[in-house]
Image (tube, rainbow, N blue to C red):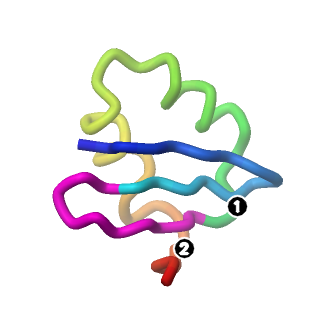
């Protein structure tokens, strides 16, 4: 489950409820962000279209 989603200048920020971790994903197209926000299952969309598709960094 995702507790928060943010997007700015190609960086997608996700906060994962299960771990409490915040992760920034880089060079994410704005269309991908919009599709995420419109998806009926955010978790499935993230698994299929975000994880392992973009470089990322954990936010301290």
Mark 2 element type? loop
Residue 26 x/y as whole percent: 65, 66
Distance (Cα) linking label 2 and label 1: 8 Å
Part of the protein shown in magenta: 16-25
Query: Nearest the camera: 29 or 6?
Result: 6
Query: Nearest the camera: 50 or 9?
Result: 9
Residue 39 x/y as whole percent: 41, 20
Q: Residues within 10 Å of mark 2 (few under 14, many from 20)?
A: few
Q: Report the disc number at residue 27.
A: 1
Image quadrant containing the N terminus: top left
| Residue 19 sits above or below residue 29 on the image | below
Q: Report the disc number at residue 55.
A: 2
Outermost residue to the bottom? 60
Query: Nearest the camera: 1 or 25?
Result: 1
Q: Do the residues bearing badges 2 and 1 touch, measured as CB atoms within 8 Å?
A: yes
Query: Nearest the camera: 5 or 25?
Result: 5
Tell how many labels. Answer: 2
Residue 40, image quadrant: top left
Q: Residues within 10 Å of mark 1 (few under 14, many from 20)?
A: few
Residue 45, image quadrant: top left
Residue 35 magenta-highlighted? no
At a point 28% along the width and 64% down the height, the residue shown is 20
| Residue 27 sits above or below residue 44 on the image | below
Sequence-wise, the earlier of marks 2 and 1 is 1
Q: Is residue 41 left or right of residue 18?
A: right
Residue 10 x/y as whole percent: 75, 54
At a point 40% along the width and 55% down the height, the residue shown is 15
Q: Report the disc number at residue 59.
A: none
Q: Is residue 42 left or right of residue 6?
A: left
At a point 46% along the width and 67% down the height, the residue shown is 23
| Residue 22 sits above or below residue 38 on the image | below
């Amino acid at each position: 489950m995702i507790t928060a989603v943010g997007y700015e200048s190609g960086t997608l920020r996700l906060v994962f409820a299960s771990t409490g971790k915040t992760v920034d994903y880089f060079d994410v197209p704005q269309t991908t962000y919009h599709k995420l926000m419109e998806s009926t299952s955010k978790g499935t969309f993230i698994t299929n279209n975000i994880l392992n598709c973009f470089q990322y960094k954990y936010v301290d």
